[in-house]
Amino acid sequence: MSTREPSQGRSIATKIVALAVFAALVVAAVLATFGYWAETTAAKRGVDAKLLALVSSADALVADDVHARALGGTLDEAAYAPIAARLTAVADEAGVEYLYTCVRRDGVVYVETTSLSQGERAEGQKPDLMKVYERVPPEAVATLDDGVTRYASYEDEYGRFRSAFRAVDTPNGRIVVAADVRLDDLHAIARKNVLFQLGIALAVLVPVALVAFVVGRRIARPIVELAEGVRSFSDSDFSNDESSIAAISRIATEERDETRTLATAMLEMRRELVRHIDELTTITAERERITSQLQLARDIQRGLLPQQAPDAAGYDIAGWSEAADETGGDFYDWMTTPQGQIVLVLADVTGHGVGPSLMAAVCRAYARATLAEESPLEPLVDRLNRLVHGDVRSGQFVTFFAGVLDPEAATVRILSAAHGPILVYRARDHRVEESPTHGLPLGVVEELEPEPGTTLSLEPGDVLLVVSDGFFEWAGASGEQFGQARLEVALLAAATSSSAEIIEFVRQAVYRHTAGTVQPDDMTAIAVKRLA
């Protein structure tokens, strides 16, 4: 830890110095900006007052007959020279760039009389008389219109100026007396004051940086030690923490500011972290054990499902099941009686998971032991119900479908204990009809006494489809369930395919409708198709 402390300490101290210097620079910049605005505003006010005073008295420098002669075109250069000289002398004395008069004739504004700037005099120029004002400021035109005194900052063919325009009504019409100060001169005054302020600010930065460095080093030392202590906690078993704990404990004891609180919190954090890691290790091991057992249970449950289709000449039979969790409460089964009939079973135990899966396994065993007998379905299902009723928990029940296929008679004798829908596709009419259910689910009451079953005849191309509610009750992202209507449409669309392909088509239709949502319940299906 001692090998890293100096460089890290300097890094933190440098950041503190940089922060202090940056803050000082920001403050200096803000003050300079405000100072520049204030200086410019103050200078502008002073200039405006000077310009107003000048234009208020300058009209006396130009006699009325001069205006008349200028407008009439009879004022020659010899008569105009002394007027320009007087204007130039007054402008120099007042410290302005130009002092001049404007008139308007036939809608055109002219510079009637004007002073000469120092630059123009140095170049030997002569003052122009009645020169067209090419880029006359709008404020000057407005003053010619309404006689209101105005100020303006603008740029024309002579340069960039701050000016005052004052109207004077003469016997020969209205004139405007104007005085100009160059904007660059105005801004130069403000810049000079701002640069002076910035110089003072920069002079203050040096001692501020030194103080910040000393303070930064003092602040950095315990922070660096805390950082080194936290870095040592990276060992997964926390086996090399003695020196770090000692350093952090010293900070928690000696310091009196926020670093003491931070050090105390870090020690507590380490204790809690060690405890949580121990708990997490135990929980992870237990979860892995449970997951392994659930996977074993899933494999066993799937092994109880039929592994191949029954041998029924002239018929195509298929089944499919998918649990919502590792294990589920649905199952399907079939068995062949000594007389060559095929017993088909599909059941749905309420709920899904381990409990329903155990009940499903028990119900399958009862069904195989009961329905293999040659007897009408009704007493067999009633006997099965009594067996299930003795095992189900309170509130648990089993919807149950049983069908006996007689290949020679081309009939299926079905009995449904509240399991539906039972859909039959009729190839001759290309339509789907629903067969009724027969009474309560298994396990609700001890004496079921089911209603008489239904005998269905199957013609070539007809399909019997039985599914669990996981198919049609699964809702999409909008909350709308797949529903029985879509189930019938899917059966119609796939009815000419094999039984396995019909089940696959129907479940893919469900997946498309419910894309983006989690399977909420077990899904199981049996399809029986009479071949042509």
Image: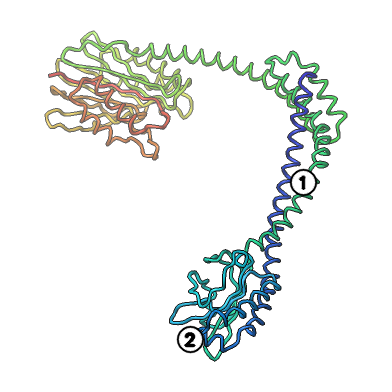
Percent x, y of residue 63: 60, 87
Confirm whether residue 163 shows in the render: no
Secondary structure found at label 2: helix
Question: As drawn, which residue projects farthest toward the front?
Answer: 78
Q: Residue at x 32, y 19 (%)?
A: 320
Asked if the residue at tag 1 contacts the one at tag 2, i.e. Cβ–Cβ closer than 8 Å, the answer is no
Out of 203 and 339, give the one closest to the viewer.
Answer: 203
Q: Is residue 356 left or right of residue 88?
A: left
Q: Is residue 385 left or right of residue 277?
A: left
Determine the image quadrant of residue 164.
Answer: bottom right
**Label 1 belongs to which residue?**
202
- Rendered position, 114 above or below 156: below
Percent x, y of residue 513: 33, 34
Q: Residues within 10 Å of mark 2 (few under 14, many from 20)?
A: few
Q: Nearer the viewer, mark 2 or mark 1?
A: 2
| Mark toward the start of the polypeptide (2 vs 1) | 2
> Hey, what amino acid is under mark 2?
Gly
Q: Which mark is residue 20?
A: none
Q: Quadrant of the C terminus?
A: top left
> Hey, what amino acid is under mark 1?
Leu
Q: Residue at x 73, y 35 (%)?
A: 15
Q: Is residue 107 left or right of residue 284?
A: left
Determine the image quadrant of residue 41.
Answer: bottom right
Percent x, y of residue 447: 37, 26
| Applied colour scheme | rainbow
Q: Residue at x 25, y 19 (%)?
A: 500
**Label 2 belongs to which residue?**
72
Question: As drawn, which residue projects farthest toward the right?
Answer: 254
